[in-house]
């Protein structure tokens, strides 16, 4: 008499076990991938505009700009302050020079986000109460420009040059103004203008 109990399938099935084990192994992987997708979707897209407040010529200016926007483009394209000129766009000609916390800066290489919370002074911010800044007046008096394209950057840089204490001699003025190029070669007149304005700036 045969033992029929031996022909019954046992409670353990190898194929079912392997399939179940593989499925359970995939659960944490799938869950982790889903969590990463959710995290990535929640992260801020670097290409999206950002909010920034720039203090320009004593006024706070709120902007909604690309995070890669330079100070120069923020001034010219967003605030319509076109005195600062775009010359080489590589920080080599000085036409875009502005003051940031009284330091000379080539604004074409400075991110607007990096200037947040600091005082930006442009050529438009030098004059007060309809009176020209002494350096602006000196440039007029000495005819220190021809085409005028580099003049705003020259004037802003010259103001800083004087305040830094580098206007004591013509040689110093030439050296410390050398980052500002004048394609019209009005350098002798620029030096004369800086010499004229220096005493009044230092006095004030």
Image (tube, rainbow, N blue to C red):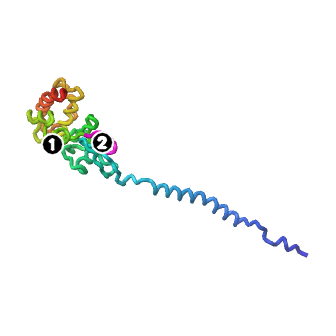
- Residue beneath the point at 63% across and 59% down: 25
Determine whether 98 is above or below 198 in the image. below
Q: Quadrant of the C terminus?
A: top left
- Residue beneath the point at 26% across and 42% down: 107
Q: Are marks 1 and 2 in contact (CB under 8 Å)?
A: no
Residue 33 x, y percent position in the rendering: 54, 57
Q: Nearer the viewer, residue 90 or 134?
A: 134
- Residue beneath the point at 21% across and 30% down: 161
Task: Determine the residue located farthest toward the front in the rendered image.
Answer: 129
On the image, which quarter does residue 91 sit in? top left
On the image, which quarter does residue 135 sit in? top left
Q: Quadrant of the N terminus?
A: bottom right
Assess disc 1: are there few (<14), some (14-19) or many (≥20) residues with their C-alpha within 10 Å of its C-alpha: some
| Residue 34 falls within the magenta-colored stretch | no
The residue pinned by badge 2 equals 110
- Residue beneath the point at 80% across and 72% down: 8
Left/right of residue 104 with respect to residue 49 in the rendered view: left
Q: CA separation, marks 1 and 2?
A: 20 Å
Assess disc 2: are there few (<14), some (14-19) or many (≥20) residues with their C-alpha within 10 Å of its C-alpha: some
Q: Nearer the viewer, residue 187 or 165?
A: 165
Residue 112 x, y percent position in the rendering: 31, 45
Classify mark 1: helix, strand or loop: loop
Classify mark 2: helix, strand or loop: loop
The residue pinned by badge 1 equals 149
Q: Nearer the viewer, residue 134 or 58?
A: 58
Left/right of residue 52 with respect to residue 153 in the rendered view: right
Left/right of residue 163 with respect to residue 191 in the rendered view: right
In primary-sequence order, the first of circles 1 and 2 is 2
Range covered by the magenta-colored residues: 111-120
Residue 195 x, y percent position in the rendering: 14, 27
Task: Determine the residue located farthest toward the bottom in the rendered image.
Answer: 1
């Amino acid at each position: 008499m045969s033992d029929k109990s031996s022909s019954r399938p046992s409670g353990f099935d190898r194929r079912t076990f392997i399939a179940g084990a593989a499925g359970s192994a995939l659960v944490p992987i799938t869950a982790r991938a889903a969590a990463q997708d959710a995290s990535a979707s929640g992260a801020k897209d670097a290409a999206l505009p950002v909010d920034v407040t720039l203090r320009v010529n004593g006024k706070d200016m709120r902007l909604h700009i690309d995070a890669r926007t330079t100070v120069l483009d923020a001034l010219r394209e967003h605030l319509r302050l076109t005195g600062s000129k775009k010359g080489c766009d590589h920080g080599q000609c000085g036409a875009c020079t502005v003051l940031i916390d009284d330091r000379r800066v080539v604004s074409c290489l400075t991110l607007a986000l990096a200037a947040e919370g600091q005082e930006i002074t442009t050529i438009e911010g030098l004059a007060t109460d309809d009176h020209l800044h002494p350096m602006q007046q000196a440039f007029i008096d000495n005819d220190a420009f021809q085409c005028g394209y580099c003049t705003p950057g020259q004037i802003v840089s010259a103001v800083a040059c004087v305040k830094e204490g580098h206007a004591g001699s013509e040689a110093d003025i030439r050296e410390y103004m050398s980052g500002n190029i004048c394609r019209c070669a009005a350098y002798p007149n620029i030096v004369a203008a800086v010499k004229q304005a220096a005493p009044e700036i230092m006095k004030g």
